[in-house]
Every structure is written in structure tokens, then in C-alpha cells.
């Protein structure tokens, strides 16, 4: 595999709500510290659906999409020492400055200038993506490209679970069995949680929660989730909860299900904010509420953990890159039964 610069590249862009087009771009060459990745698999994320609706709080249209991806290293800059041509990799798609206080404290997830490759016109619904070498991670030999593309959302779940300090034997309550909620359930069990209760609409997603390590599921159409948690725990409530939907009602459930001094971690993206909270309950039960976003040193943990998780079962649909519009329509269609839609090249 050898490439010649300038290199032609197609990049998928949401240019108006629900509409995709491909931009024809040219990659002129690589800076010394850059790596060219030939994209093999690129997954559609819940955040891409917020973008597709034109309602992502921090990614206004038009914007190129694709930040969950894997591929082959196709070329490397002259100062690159670790990545090699032909290597199978996934990519941490953030761009940080390296010099702000947060970066110098190793807390690059809070870089004052953080951005993501896709927001800079370098989306991964594309033939190629150019990234900096430190953000490239080798895939284990047995991991497929499709699973490799899911190391990004698995890192988001890993980050949330680490922030929540889930402990041995804890009871955890998760609202929302989307990909992030399911991956959070899986990582909570791996972190030692004794009981993981997942709430959502009955169906395949709740079944999958059980396959990934949840101990109990709650059909939110049939019962109040917080009451169900109290019943399942003999009146104690959950030690930790995660809101993985992005809705006020779900945040209320995640808070109300907690025991005294419990911690709720919000992972969902809110199209509508601010929201109302059960504040009296938070005071009387001394509840803690925190957010979790993105990742910071979480990729290697996710890649290691994924070896023991059935990552392939997240992938419900695959399309060739050319069919990005259909892929996005499928992901947006609530009747499609999609969990992860992956573009292949
Ligand atoms: Zn994502
Ligand atoms: Zn910084």
C-alpha cells in the first residue's frame, strides 16, 4: 500500500438538517508528526444524529461527520516513530493544544482549546483521515475493523464509569439502553459492580443489556424505573446511576433511584437545556450530580476491555461509504431496530 500526494479524498458532510453530501478534498501531504489513516470502518454515533437534526449544542451545520473509526495506516510523516504503514488502528479523534493548564496537568480532556477532527472538516465518513501520531492505537489482531470503530464510544463509557468511581459490589442504575448505556453497563460489571439495572423500552436493547452483564432490566413503559430500583434493592436504592439519554425525565429517574449520598453521572447530550431537577431530594439525600464527556486516557482501557466483550453484537447494519445518506436515514429511523450503523470501505 503506497499513496501519492496530493491525495484525493471524499468527506461526508451534513449540510442541512437530514441531508448528506460528499465534499471532494485534497490531502496535500503530511506534517512530520501526522499519520494518514485509510478508513475501513466508521460508525454513526448518537451525537451524529443530533448533528443530523441540526440540534447538536456545539457542532453547528454544515459539519463533516465521523469520529468513531478504524482503518489502516497508509502513510506516516517523517518524525513518526511508533505508527507503521499497514498497521490496523483506531483513533482518538480529539485535538488538544498541549500547552494550556489542563493539558500540562495531563487532563487533556479539558483542554481550553479542545476540538475534534470531524469539527475541523476532517470527518471519518471519508476515504482518509489525517491524525497526529499520539492519538493512534493499534487494534488487537483478533479485533475486526467494525469493532475497532467502536473503541471510541467504549472509551466514552469507560470515562463515565471511571468518573463515577464504581466500586466492588455496587448497585448501579443506568437509564437508556442505547450504545453508550449498554457499554456503560458492560464496563460497570467489569469495574466490579455487583448489580447493574438497566431501564428502557422493552425489546432487543434490554436483552442485550443482560448479555453484556446487566443483572436486571426495567421496562419503563410498564413500571416507574426509580420504584423498580427500590424494589429490586430491598428499599436501599442504587449507589451510582448514569443518565444515558439526554432527557429531563430520565435525569429525574436517575436521581430518584439513588440511595443517600449516591452519585449520578450524566452522559446524555441535551438538545434542551436547562432542565428541572428534584432539588429537595438532592438536598435531603445529599446526592451528587456530575457530568462525563469524551475521554482522557481511556482508549487503552477500552481496547483492553473490548477483548472480552461481544462488540460485534452492537453492529446491526453496515453500508458502503457511498450509501452514507441511507445509513444515516436508517440510524435516524426508530423503527429500523438499529443500534450501531457502520460504514465500510
Ligand atoms: Zn461518538
Ligand atoms: Zn490544552
Image (cartoon, rainbow, N blue to C red):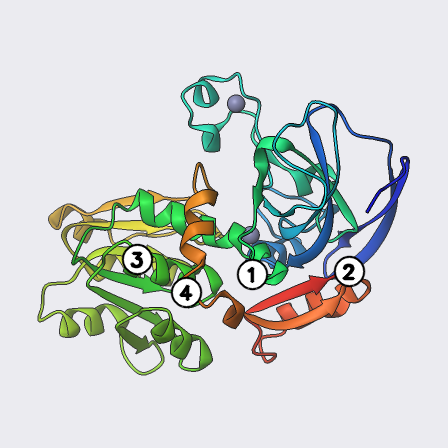
- Counting labels gives 4
Q: Position of residue 125 (x, y in %)?
A: 73, 53
Q: Which residue is mark 1?
A: 147
Q: Is residue 253 above or below residue 9?
A: below
Disc sitting over residue 182 in the figure: 4
Q: Of circles 4 and 2, which is in front?
A: 4
* Left or right of 248 on screen, residue 169: left
Q: Of circles 2 and 1, which is in front?
A: 1
Q: Are marks 2 and 3 in contact (CB under 8 Å)?
A: no
Q: Are marks 3 and 4 in contact (CB under 8 Å)?
A: no
Q: Is residue 303 above or below residue 213?
A: above
Q: Which residue is mark 3?
A: 190
Q: CA distance from mark 3 to mark 4?
A: 13 Å
- Image quarter in which the C terminus is found: bottom right
Going from N to C along the chain, the mark reached first, 2 or 3, is 2
Q: Is residue 312 above or below residue 82?
A: below
Which SS class for mark 3?
A: helix
Q: CA distance from mark 2 to mark 1?
A: 27 Å
* Left or right of 194 on screen, residue 49: right
Q: Which residue is mark 2?
A: 19
Q: Position of residue 263 (x, y in %)?
A: 23, 49
Residue sitting at 41 percent across and 75 percent down?
A: 208
Amino acid at each position: 500500500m503506497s499513496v501519492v500526494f496530493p491525495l484525493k479524498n471524499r468527506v461526508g458532510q451534513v449540510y442541512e438538517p437530514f441531508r448528506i453530501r460528499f465534499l471532494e478534498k485534497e490531502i496535500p501531504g503530511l506534517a512530520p508528526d501526522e499519520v494518514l489513516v485509510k478508513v475501513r470502518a466508521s460508525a454513526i454515533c448518537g451525537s451524529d444524529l443530533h448533528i443530523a437534526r441540526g440540534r447538536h449544542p456545539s457542532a453547528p451545520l454544515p459539519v463533516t461527520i465521523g469520529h468513531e473509526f478504524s482503518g489502516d495506516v497508509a502513510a506516516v510523516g517523517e518524525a513518526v516513530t511508533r505508527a507503521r504503514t499497514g498497521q490496523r488502528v483506531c483513533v482518538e479523534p480529539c485535538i488538544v493544544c498541549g500547552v494550556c493548564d489542563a493539558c500540562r496537568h495531563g487532563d487533556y480532556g479539558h483542554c481550553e482549546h479542545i476540538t475534534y477532527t470531524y469539527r475541523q472538516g476532517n470527518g471519518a465518513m471519508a476515504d482518509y483521515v489525517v491524525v497526529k501520531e499520539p492519538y493512534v492505537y493499534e487494534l488487537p489482531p483478533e479485533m475486526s475493523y467494525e469493532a475497532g470503530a467502536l473503541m471510541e464510544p467504549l472509551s466514552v463509557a469507560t470515562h463515565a464509569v471511571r468518573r463515577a468511581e464504581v466500586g466492588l459490589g455496587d448497585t448501579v442504575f443506568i437509564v437508556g439502553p442505547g450504545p453508550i448505556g449498554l457499554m456503560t453497563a458492560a464496563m460497570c460489571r467489569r469495574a466490579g459492580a455487583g448489580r447493574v439495572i438497566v431501564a428502557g423500552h422493552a425489546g432487543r436493547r434490554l436483552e442485550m443489556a443482560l448479555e453484556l452483564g446487566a443483572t436486571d432490566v426495567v421496562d419503563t413503559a410498564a413500571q416507574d424505573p426509580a420504584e423498580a430500583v427500590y424494589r429490586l434493592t430491598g428499599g436501599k436504592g442504587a449507589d451510582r446511576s448514569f443518565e444515558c439519554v439526554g432527557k429531563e425525565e430520565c435525569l429525574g429517574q436517575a436521581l430518584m433511584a439513588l440511595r443517600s449520598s449516591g452519585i449520578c453521572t450524566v452522559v446524555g447530550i441535551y438538545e434542551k437545556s436547562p432542565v428541572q431537577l428534584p432539588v429537595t431530594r438532592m438536598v435531603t439525600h445529599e446526592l451528587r450530580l456530575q457530568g462525563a464527556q469524551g475521554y482522557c486516557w481511556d482508549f487503552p482501557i477500552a481496547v483492553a476491555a473490548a477483548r472480552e466483550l461481544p462488540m460485534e453484537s452492537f453492529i446491526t447494519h453496515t453500508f458502503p461509504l457511498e450509501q452514507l445518506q441511507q445509513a444515516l436515514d436508517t440510524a435516524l429511523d426508530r423503527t429500523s431496530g438499529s443500534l450501531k450503523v457502520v460504514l465500510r470501505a
